[in-house]
Every structure is written in C-alpha cells, then in structure tokens.
Amino acid sequence: MVNKEKFHIALSQGKMNEVKELTQEALDNGETAEMILKDGLIHAMDQVGSKFKSGEIYIPEVLIAARAMHAGMAILKPILSKSTTSSQEKVLIGTVKGDLHDIGKNLVIMMLEGGGFEVIDLGIDVPASKFIEAIQTHQPRVVGISALLTTTMREMKTTLEAIEKAGLRNQVKMIVGGTPLTEKFAGEIGADGYAPDAASAVDVVRSLLVQ
Ligand code: B12
C-alpha cells in the first residue's frame, strides 16, 4: 500500500528529496508506478489543491508542492513512458494560451509515450499560432490541448477555430482535457475527444486513430 499520508506531508512541504525517496521506496516495495502516481502524488496534490481553494495556503506553497510532484514524476517517467508498441504515431500537445499549469499535461505525455506515441510538447501558454505552425511542421495525427482554468477554457475554442481557419482541421483529431472540462464542453467547442485523466487519454487517442 502506498503511504498516502507520508506523500502528502512531504509533497505539501515541498520536500523534493523526500518525495523522490518515497517514490523510489514504493517502487522497491513492489507498488506499480500507476498506483504511486494515483495514491501518492496525485492524491497529495489534490489535498494541496483543496487547501489552496479554501485559502489555507497560497501560490508559493502550491509552487513548491508542484516542484516536489515533478521530482516524484521524474522517477516514474522511465517506467510510465516505457513503450510496449512501436506505432510511433505523432501527438502534438500544449497548454492553452494564458494558462501555466502543466503537471497534468506532463502526465498525459508520459502515458502517451508509454502507449507508444511520439509526443511533441509545445509547453505552456501556447497561442493558436504556435499550434498551427507546429501542425504544419510535424504533421501530427492528434493534437491535445490542456486547460486548468475556467478563464482559459474559452481559449481552447479560439485555438480550434484558428486551426480550422488555417485549413488544417481535417488533418488532425483534436482532444482536450483539464480539470474544469467536461465531455459536453468538448463537444460544444468541436473537439473530437475528451479524457478526464492521463490513462484514459491514451485510450481516447487510440480510438480516434481508428475512426
Ligand atoms: C499546481 C497548481 C498551480 C501551479 C501550477 C504549477 C504547474 N507547473 O502546473 C501554480 C501555482 C502556478 C498555479 C497558478 C494558478 N492557479 Co492553479 N492550481 C494548481 C492545482 C493545486 C493543481 C493542478 C494539478 O497539477 N493537478 C494535478 C494534475 C495531475 O491534474 P490535472 O491538471 O487535472 O490533470 C489531469 C486531467 O485534468 C487530465 N488532463 C490535463 N490536461 C490534459 C490534456 C489533455 C489533452 C487530456 C486528454 C487530458 C488532460 O489528465 C491529467 C492527468 O490525469 C489546482 C487545484 C487542483 N486540484 O486541480 C489549482 C487550480 C487549477 N488553480 C487555480 C487558480 C485560480 C490559479 C491562479 C489563477 C491563481 C492566482 N490567483 O494567480 C494561477 C493561474 C496561473 C495561470 N495563468 O495559469 C484554480 C482554478 C479555478 C478555476 N476554476 O479556474 C484551481 C482549480 C485551484 C482552486 N480550486 O481554486 N496553480
């Protein structure tokens, strides 16, 4: 069993080395990378999120927790990204303009790489023009957009419209994700797919490619 409480204490205090050690220890004890991610890192980050929401902690504390989360994720990355297939279809992904959240996007990338996809990461705060340029350069089959803020969700629609206007919409399947999103919203803005978490993102991308 992953020790949720230890992960929570270490992560919320931003103790990078401790989070790394706990992650390694859990792996050595036979826990799967998926379980450590879910019950250790994501669970702890959710608690940090609740405290942030209720005003108990502020941005600096969230940032140090995010840094510790990345330290733990770095240990899991080689395992989660270990590809079992060699399809190497290309997926382009980025966090929408105005939005700086990237932990979830980075997890989606790890899982996609683990699923055998080649992922091109455009990073955070990505304007529509950069998505368009990258589609032209890399010719991906799928484009993923992440948004964590209700205010930046709208920018996803703008991005989709710009891709359409550039005449590239038919070349790519568009998938969207991030906490405030719903399947309904994804449909409303004209996306082809939505996934609530990184594991199902891989399934959705696969299903879009056989359509
Ligand atoms: C960490 C964090 C930050 C960090 C980000 C660090 C980083 N490197 O990412 C910092 C401190 C920078 C930050 C800043 C802000 N934040 Co913030 N932040 C969070 C927090 C606590 C955790 C987010 C996270 O990483 N979750 C863990 C990951 C694993 O989950 P996830 O992101 O949801 O990703 C999963 C799925 O959504 C999905 N997914 C994600 N992307 C994609 C993409 C695709 C294509 C697919 C298919 C799936 C998918 O798969 C992922 C993995 O399973 C959340 C609260 C929360 N619990 O969500 C608030 C939260 C998102 N932040 C919030 C706010 C308000 C802000 C600020 C505006 C605060 C401020 N006043 O300045 C700024 C905005 C900065 C900006 N312009 O972006 C609010 C948003 C409210 C809203 N409804 O809009 C939240 C919800 C907190 C709250 N409850 O108030 N934040």
Image (cartoon, rainbow, N blue to C red):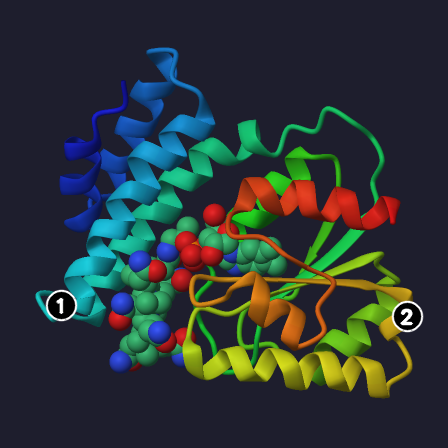
Please name the residue shown 20% across and 44% down the image: 15
> Relative to residue 162, is residue 141 depicted above or below?
above
**Residue 110 spot, x, y in % from top left:** 58, 42
Residue 199 in the image: x percent, y percent? 56, 40
The Cα atoms of the two marked residues, 2 and 1, are separated by 43 Å
Looking at the picture, how far across and down is residue 85, in whole percent? Answer: 78, 27
Residue lying farthest to the front in this orientation: 184
User: Residue at label 2?
Assistant: 170
- For label 2, count other residues whose C-alpha is less than 10 Å away and answer few (under 14), some (14-19) or many (20+): few
As drawn, is 18 to the left or to the right of 193? Answer: left
| Residue kind at label 2, given as amino acid type | Asn
Between 42 and 70, which is closer to the camera in this rendering?
A: 42
Q: Is residue 152 left or right of residue 186?
A: left
Q: Residue at x 84, y 59 (%)?
A: 140
The residue closer to the viewer here, 136 or 5, is 5
Q: Position of residue 161 (x, y in %)?
A: 75, 85
Q: Is mark 2 within 8 Å of ligand 1?
A: no
Helix, strand or loop status at disc 1: loop
Q: Residues within 10 Å of mark 1 (few under 14, many from 20)?
A: few
Instruction: Examine the image and state in which quarter residue 33 appears.
Output: top left
Residue on which disc 1 sits: 54
- Secondary-structure class at tag 2: helix
Q: Quadrant of ligand 1?
A: bottom left
**The image quarter in which residue 25 lies:** top left
Tell me: 145 left or right of 52.
right
The residue under the point 72% across, 74% down is 190
Eyeballing the image, is 11 above or below 82? below
